[in-house]
Image: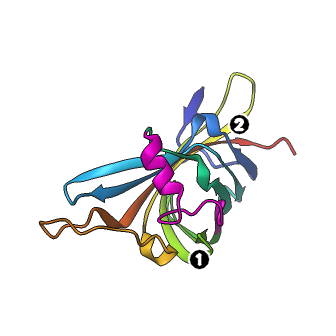
């Protein structure tokens, strides 16, 4: 794939569909107060709209039961009512409400994030990592988005206090999204 950063090339106007094969939706949370636990989701979809060489709208949905952490027992606990409660709340949803270009190729993206029936604003720092054309002639856009949220605001309150006073799981969750999207033909 040929790539060029958007600092040298404007993003074409259009709608871009997330290519889940070449993307990842992940999270990081402090575990036992001493290390960082990382996980992600395998089933998600989203669109990015661009206009005038810039990002103009972003929307995405995550299937909560697709949590991917390489441990089935812990995965089952995370799908339970203690955490994502996937039977009652099968999807998480994000829709942008404001996009500010901070500098060329960098944005502050604010949106409403809904998880477990609760909706709160989330701010993501977005960097355009590349823009190019794949061997099949499809235009591709790559973004890295990072932000943070308080999981307890969404009803994910399960925790345990350890003997040293540290929490088993931090309330702060770091979001890390590496997204490659393909421009729609129409």
90 in magenta? yes
Say whether residue 115 is left or right of residue 170: right
Q: Residues within 10 Å of mark 2 (few under 14, many from 20)?
A: many
Q: State the separation of the CA atoms marked 2 and 1.
A: 35 Å
For disc 2, the marked residue is: 139
Q: Residue at x 72, y 46 (%)?
A: 17
Snapshot quadrant of residue 79: bottom right
Q: Position of residue 85 (x, y in %)?
A: 57, 63
Q: Looking at the image, is 54 positioned above or below residue 161?
A: above
22 in magenta? no
Q: Which mark is residue 118?
A: 1
Say whether residue 118 is left or right of residue 38: right
Q: Looking at the image, is 31 positioned above or below residue 129?
A: below
Snapshot quadrant of residue 158: bottom left
Q: Position of residue 44 (x, y in %)?
A: 65, 49
Q: Residue at x 48, y 48 (%)?
A: 75
């Amino acid at each position: 794939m040929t790539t060029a950063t958007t600092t040298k090339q404007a993003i074409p106007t259009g709608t871009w569909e997330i290519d889940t094969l070449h993307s990842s939706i992940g999270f990081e949370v402090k575990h036992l107060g001493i290390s960082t636990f990382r996980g992600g989701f395998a089933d998600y979809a989203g669109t990015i709209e661009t206009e005038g060489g810039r990002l103009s709208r972003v929307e995405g949905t995550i299937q909560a039961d697709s949590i991917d952490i390489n441990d089935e027992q812990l995965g089952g606990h995370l799908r339970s009512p203690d955490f994502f409660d996937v039977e009652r709340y099968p999807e998480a949803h994000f829709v942008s409400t404001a996009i500010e270009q901070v500098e060329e190729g960098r944005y502050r993206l604010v949106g409403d994030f809904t998880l477990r029936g609760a909706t709160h604003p989330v701010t993501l720092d977005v960097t355009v990592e590349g823009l190019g054309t794949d061997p099949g002639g499809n235009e591709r856009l790559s973004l890295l988005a990072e932000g943070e949220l308080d999981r307890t605001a969404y009803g994910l309150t399960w925790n345990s206090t350890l003997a040293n006073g540290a929490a088993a799981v931090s309330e702060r969750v770091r979001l890390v999204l590496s997204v490659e999207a393909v421009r729609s033909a129409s």
